[in-house]
Amino acid sequence: MAREATLVAPAARPLLSRRARELLTGYLYLIPVILALGCTVLFPILKAMHMSLYNHVLIRPQEYGYVGLANYARLLHDETFWLSLWNSFLWVFGSVSFQFLGGFAAALLLHQSFRGRALVRTITLLPWIIPGVVVALIWEFIYQPNYGLLNDILSRTGVMTERVAWLANPGLAMPAVIVTNIWRGMPFFAIMLLAGLQAIPGELYEAARVDGASVFQRFCFITLPMLKPIIVVATATRIVWTFNYADLIFVMTSGGPANATQITSTYTLLQAYSNLDFGYAATLSVALLLIMLVFTVFYLRITRGLEGVA
Amino acid sequence: MNEHRILSRRVLLKTMAAAGAITAAQLKWWEEPLLRPRRAWGAAPVRFQFSVPEPKRNALVDSLVQRFNQIQNDFEVKVEFVPQAQARQKLITSVAAGSPPDCCQIWDNWVGEFEGMGALEDLTTKAKDWKHYKDVLPLAWQTVTVKNKIASLPWVVTNDALYYRTDRLKEYGIAPPKDDWGFDQFLAFTKAFTKTDKNQYGFGMRGQGTWAVLYATEFMYANGAQVLKDGKVVINSREAAEALDWYLDLFRKHKVCPPSVPTDGWRGIVEGFGRGVTNTYIHNSGSAEEQKGFVGEQNFSTVPLPLGPAKKRNSFYFSETLTAFNKGKSREGAWRFMAWLMEDEPNLMYTKGLGLLPSRKTLFERPEFMQDPAYRGFIKSFPFSIVSPYLAYAGWGGKIDSEGVPLFQQALVGKLSSKEFLDKFAEVLTKNMS
């Protein structure tokens, strides 16, 4: 009697190797993120670039059409754009440098232990928590020349005899809005740097103290180097934010008086929502994007390696 | 447990009764209470966009809309409130997207822009067949007529005059201004009203917003200047520059204005007067009711703007319009609602509530307008009022604000001379004559 033999069929060879499948699965997981970023970041950028090549003034639909680089040529000859770029530089430099110095000082103070520290920390955060528009309204009232708080205090204390138009004087308007932005942005640096300070091991300070290092030396050779990575990231982030931050100025001065506080982001808003010139507003946005890209590359290059020190 | 439930119910009923009483009190100005049952099923929706310059108007417009919805069964108006600062762009974007409201309330200086976009419903035939056509002031029809077509209904009208404090006039022993006063008397008047030691200024000049340029233009017209002549922009004439110099010197040289002028927009000048910082300011009648609340009805009055060296003067006349869109889904409903808002009762409710003047002669001539000192200056200014010359071209609307005002501010703070400002401004206008 013949015996039946069952042969095991050889396993089918998978279409893709194990490594390829793992790689593909990884990419599949990335699809939602790619889609989300594509829709919310990439598409608007490409759309803005596309719009910048068109004459797209909403109140003149008849004139809509492709104009090539005409909007960019207009930008190069636009005096207000160059003025707004210079104002943006003053705005960013003035705001971020003093925010950093003030925030650093606050972080060093808050790092000390004292009674009520938690309460003081919370209060320090307040300007950052309040919405930008509300901050602008509060400071607009403070600066109001006729019945504002600042002029009232200065005149009651005899510091000044004539009322000062803080926001209506072209020479004072920019410093005034910068002071407001410093007040608003200081807590950001304070909190970031405080977190960094708390991460520095106490042994380092103890060892330095045993070696006879002074307070200043400990600050220069331990605190600063250990905080450098945070300083680099926080400053870069803040510079980009401030450059694009239009709320304060838009509410307080609308870019005036006489364009004295007109920064590129408020100028872009003006073109888009007052002139309804979306083509030119898109051109300004693309220019802003390029300026920020160049700045970021330059900044990261000069601070290369610092972010990895800690 | 039961007792607690009964008490809660009582509290609930009392609360409801109180809420009803408060609501009824709010509606007491309405002659006929809201009693009629709601409209029939199937009423066609009508979208109405209302731009809100101040919250007071919301309740008023809501009441008007409710009222319209109750007196007829064919249409149901749904009102969309939009802050005034965003109203223009919201409308333009909705037109561009092909989904405008059926009708809206806008100022006449926007009408040209919408007409230029080909978005407006031509109301010429309907308006001419309308029963109140001849009752509407001819100047009011002019403000809404674009290229010989009636583009809107002039809901309310107003012009510019000078508000001044009558109580302080007596306090400082200043003679009240006469209707035919001139530039020199205006300067002397504002100087006498300036008491810097008391933080009081003689004139609340406007430095921000489109009307900053319009008020200055009224003084230029008083010196014989014009914006357009034979189809050319001539606002940079010698007469215009001289008058502008004189006007700006009120702030620059004579210091009769508060230091906040370059950033003072509409709210700035109205509040400046209301808080007692300024003793005069130029505005339309739209802030009269507000000032009655701020400084008291008996403490202020209005007077026409002064005559210039050329013995001329103008007050720019404009209207708040009711405008319908040709892409609206309920064009008949829009017309019925707009025409109803022009009827005696709703029109009077709206105008009296806000300090604006009705565009219909029979309403305008009623004693509540003609005999109120707050409106005196405006009514006296009607004989020499003209439609704003800046309505001539749709392209000028947004440009005055975005380019004209920053230039004006530069002249105000001395960065540009009056002539330099006017030359640059004339360039802006010439470029946008479309």
Image (tube, coloured by chain):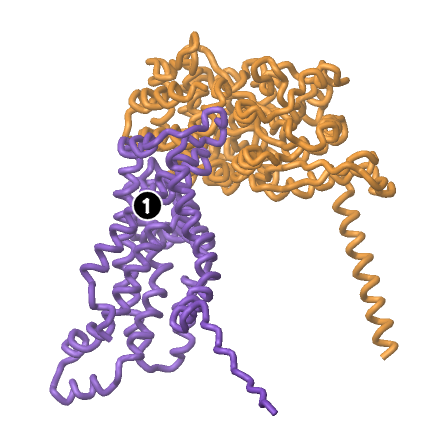
Chain colours: A purple, B orange
In the drawing, does residue A174 fall left or right of residue B216?
Answer: left
Q: Identify the image quadrant of the C terminus of chain B.
A: top left
Q: Callout 1: residue from which chain?
A: A
Q: Nearer the viewer, residue A78 or B156?
A: A78
Which residue sits furthest front? Answer: A1
Q: Is residue B99 visible from the viewing direction of this image? A: yes
Q: Is residue B403 above or below residue A189?
A: above
Q: Is residue B309 visible from the viewing direction of this image? A: no
Q: Write down the residue under mark 1.
A: A288
Quarter of the image for residue A18 reads: bottom left
x and y percentages locating residue B225 in the rendered image: 40, 13
Quarter of the image for residue A286 reads: top left
Which residue sits furthest top? Answer: B230
**Residue at the image position 29 percent from the left and 64 percent from the top:** A233
Q: Nearer the viewer, residue A91 or B137?
A: A91
- Binning the other alpha carbons within 10 Å of mark 1 as few (below 14), some (14 to 19) or many (20 upward) gives some
Q: Is residue B291 above or below residue A127?
A: above
Which residue sits furthest left? Answer: A212
Q: Nearer the viewer, residue B212 or A310?
A: A310
Mark 1 secondary-structure assignment:
helix
Q: Identify the image quadrant of the N terminus of chain B.
A: bottom right
**Residue at the image position 20 percent from the left and 59 percent from the top:** A301
User: Mark 1 is on which residue type?
Assistant: Leu
Q: Nearer the viewer, residue A92 or B200?
A: A92
